[in-house]
Every structure is written in C-alpha cells, then in structure tokens.
Image (cartoon, grey):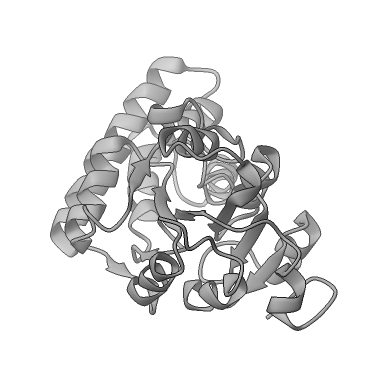
Amino acid sequence: MTMPATADPGQCFRSRRPLKLAVLDLSGTTVDEGGLQDEAFIAAIHQEGVEPGTSRYDAMLGYFQEARGASRHEIFRAVFAEDTVAARRANHIFEKTYDRLLAERGVKPMDGADQAIAELREAGMKIVLTTGFARHTQNMILESLGWMGVSDLSLCPSDAGRGSPYPDMILTALLALDLDDVRSVMAVGDTVRDIRAGQRAGAGLTVGVLTGYDDSAAFSGAGASAVVPSIREVPPLVSGTASRAS
C-alpha cells in the first residue's frame, strides 16, 4: 500500500473533515468485467475498417485504454475526429457488442467489493456508483450483479454532463444527495482520470486502486491521497473519519 507521508491510515486522515459520501467507479474498481469493453472497442473500430497490427489500430486502442473513464461518446469522437458519422456509428457498434457480451458472459464484483460497500455504509457513508458507459449499459451491469439497490445513486456521463477526468458526476452526486461540503467526498477509481475528477471536484480523499488500468507510480504522480491494492482496503482508510449521522 502506498500512503501519503505516513504508513498509518488513521493518522493520515484524522485531521480531515468527516466523510459522508463514497463515489466509486465501476469497471476496474468495484467490477471485474473481464476485458469485455476492450473486446467491444476492437470490434467497433474493426467494423470501421481499422485493421489490427496497423499504427492507427494501436493508437486508437491505446487511447481507449488510457481514456476508459471518459464517456464512450467522447472517446469515439476523439479517435474518429475526422469523421463524426463514423464516430457515432462506431459508438453504436460498441454499445451493441458490449451489451451482447455482457448478456452472454456477465460480470462479477471485484473480490471484497460487496463487503467494502457494506462497511462504508456501516460507517454512515452514502454510496454512488459511476461509470463512463451509457445509462442502459450501466443498468445492465448493475442488474447482472444484483446491485440495482446497492447504492444511493448511480451516475453516467449523460446524467451529469461529462465523464472523468471532469468533476461533473461527483458534483452532481453531491447536489442530488443534498450534501453541503465536497470535502466530505471520497472518490475511488482505478485510473488517474478518476483521481483528477476527485481533485477537480475538491473531494476530501482520492483513492487509487490497483485492480484496473493505472499503476501505483501513476497514482502517486497524480497526487492521489492513497493507493491501495483493491477496493477491500478502502474502508480502513476512512475508519474514524466517516460521519455516523443519519
């Protein structure tokens, strides 16, 4: 575990304001989707004539992997910047392919995710689940997991404006749940983009988990408050700091 300045989580965060809201990313953070979105992206660009082994293919796939926390619409607009029709078409193919793969194979929670969410709730925190997927895809993921009622709110970019690294979903969650201080928010994700979103929103705690795309060095370089192996190590970071008010 990489911690800021000291190895004692309680000491690290004791001076922080009480935490009331945990904003948790889905894929790579709380959900193991087994590479379905990479497979769907590859299918989408291939149908647009982008062949594996070409420099264009490598550049597009690399961009998608680095920007996976962003709205999928934004990603396809970026990789097909010269052709907006192709961008819309590829995004549609991606969504259809991902939904088919999800229906066929399903997804599973990250090890310890259910328990971590339960422990955060027991600490008095509200839970928001966020994603860069479209709303119907997010709902399919939650339904596949039996998680439709596990959070106080679930948000995708179309609900708020933009996906990570923008703060829109975090600020939307704060307003929707009638919380008055963004410093009471903990933002948790598997990419630097998730950390940036938390920082730009003014979250009191930003946590990178190592079960997704980015590594410890990337998170530390981005200034994450803490870096932990997985979601199961998140609740101990906030022990004694969460608000127990109803």
Residue 59's place in the image compared with 123, above or below, is above
- Outermost residue on the front side: it is 245
Residue 19 location in percent, x, y?
Answer: 58, 57
Image quadrant of residue 26? bottom left
The residue at 46%/62% (across/down) is 28
8 or 140: nearer the viewer: 8
Which residue is at 80% across, 71% downward? 4
Quadrant for the C terminus, please: bottom left
Residue 17 horizontal side relative to residue 238, left or right: right
Q: Is residue 110 visible?
A: no
x, y percent for residue 69 = 51, 46
Relative side of 54 to 219, left or right: left
Q: Is 33 situated above or below 134?
A: below
**In the rendered picture of this protein, how many numbered marks are placed on residues?**
0
Q: Can residue 194 be spotted in the picture?
A: yes
Residue 83: horizontal and vertical position, in percent? Answer: 48, 17
Pick whichever, 231 or 237, lies toward us.
Answer: 237
Quarter where residue 44 is shown = top left
Taking the view exactly as shown, the residue that stands out farthest to the left is 104
Q: Look at 54% across and 35% down and name the residue there.
A: 171
240 left or right of 99 in image = right
- Residue 100 location in percent, x, y? 17, 49
Q: Determine whether 217 is above or below 167 in the image.
A: below
Of residues 150 and 161, the one drawn nearer to the viewer in this rendering: 150
Q: Which quadrant would residue 104 be assigned to in this image?
A: bottom left
The N terminus is located in which quarter? bottom right
